[in-house]
Amino acid sequence: MTIWVDADACPAVIRDIICRAAQRTATPAVFVANRRPALPASPHIRSIVVGQGFDVADAEIARQCQQGDLLVSGDIPLAAQVLAKGAAAINFRGEAYSSDTIEGQLTLRDFMDNLRGSGIQSGGPPPFSQADRQQFAGKLDQWLAARQRRPAAPTP
């Protein structure tokens, strides 16, 4: 199991929470971005720097993410791709994406994108709060705890 982070848009406070959790639980965390993010030295934390371009980091995450992994991203289309592969996905505020609701989220995202494209100001998300940080940390801890409770596959 690996934590995949869409690092180009990841708030620094969320990056720090992920790094501490990866070190504490010896869980691999991979930060994928167009430029190298500032990360602590750890055998459990690494980065992949991809070329410039639209959705290059997303394509790399989608290619490497596997069943049982976790995606941390605000990108709904990327979340849909990894959910289809059997991975879990949460956004930077700790809200889980689900295969039951992802189609509706994609539709709403496209609708809002069309509104913005036509010049209608829709506002943005509310400012990132302490409650958002806590919700993210709690959701990440839940995912990690659930993975640690699963029995290891028997070795042949």
Image: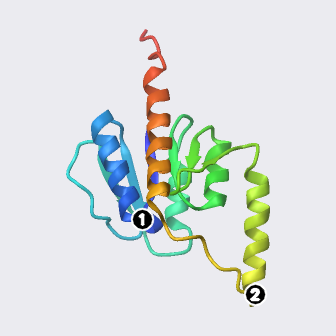
Which image quarter is the N terminus in? top left
Pick out the residue farthest to the left. Answer: 41
On residue 72, the disc is none
Helix, strand or loop at mark 2: loop
User: Percent position (x, y) of residue 8?
Assistant: 44, 67
Depth check: 37 or 101 in front? 101
- Say which residue label 2 marks: 120
Question: CA gap, disc 1 to disc 2?
Answer: 27 Å
The structure residue drawn at horizontal position 75% and vertical position 48%, both measured from the top left corner, is 101
Q: What type is the residue that disc 1 sits on?
A: Pro
Residue 1 visible within the image = no
- Say which residue label 1 marks: 11
The structure residue drawn at horizontal position 35% and vertical position 37%, both measured from the top left corner, is 27
User: Percent position (x, y) of residue 93?
Assistant: 53, 56
The structure residue drawn at horizontal position 62% and vertical position 53%, both measured from the top left corner, is 79
Relative to residue 137, is residue 122 drawn left or right? right
Number of dots carrying numbers:
2
The structure residue drawn at horizontal position 56% and vertical position 74%, both measured from the top left corner, is 54
Neighbourhood count class around disc 2 (C-alpha, 10 Å): few under 14, some 14–19, many 20 upward: few
Q: What type is the residue that disc 2 sits on?
A: Ile
User: Percent position (x, y) of residue 129?
Assistant: 47, 63
Neighbourhood count class around disc 1 (C-alpha, 10 Å): few under 14, some 14–19, many 20 upward: few
Picture colour scheme: rainbow
Q: Is residue 101 above or below residue 66?
A: below
Relative to residue 74, is residue 156 drawn left or right? left
Nearer the N terminus, badge 1 or badge 2? 1
